Image (tube, grey):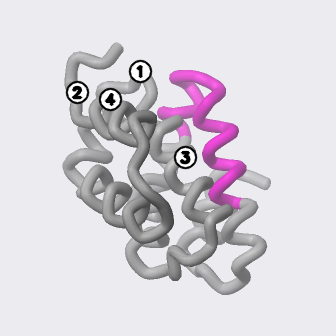
Amino acid sequence: MGVQTLVQVLEVRADREAVTGAVWTVAHLAAGGPDCQAELAGAGVIPALLGLAKKHSVADDQLCEGLARAVAALANRSPANQDALRNAGAVELMVAMLQVTHVITPADENAKASILSSDYA
């Protein structure tokens, strides 16, 4: 499955199982390092993920966890992606989504702080 196919699955949002699989695939690919992060961001994964988070039911814990992990993996040690995520409203969206699904933990706060920190490297 190519990156553009992942983006299409995230944008279409038709099949919950396919969407959840695509979200987790993005999370795993983004954890692969800077080249993977850049390719995913360049293909439009960030707006696709955030659009999904805005419009999809957050009652599914597996989907919510996948979204949070994908956002964190895209932001990890990537100032460009951190800026893109911050400017697109990812921090507020993730916090709101996490508050609906579970109590905010120190790990959640740390993830939020790393996205907000422009000095994260």
Q: Nearer the viewer, residue 41 or 60?
A: 60
Q: Circle 4 sits on which residue?
A: 114
Q: Which residue is mark 2?
A: 117
Q: Quadrant of residue 112?
A: top left
| Residue hosting label 1 | 77
Left or right of 42 on screen, residue 3: right
User: Which residue is labeled 3 in the image?
Assistant: 70
User: How far across and down, in percent of the image, does residue 91 sit?
Assistant: 28, 50
Q: Is residue 46 visible?
A: yes
**N-terminal of the two: label 3 or label 2?**
3
SS of the residue at dot 3?
helix
Under mark 2, the amino acid is Ser
Residue at the bottom extreme of this rendering = 14
Q: CA distance from mark 1 to mark 2?
A: 10 Å
**Residue 50 on the magenta segment:** no
Quadrant for the N terminus, please. Answer: bottom right
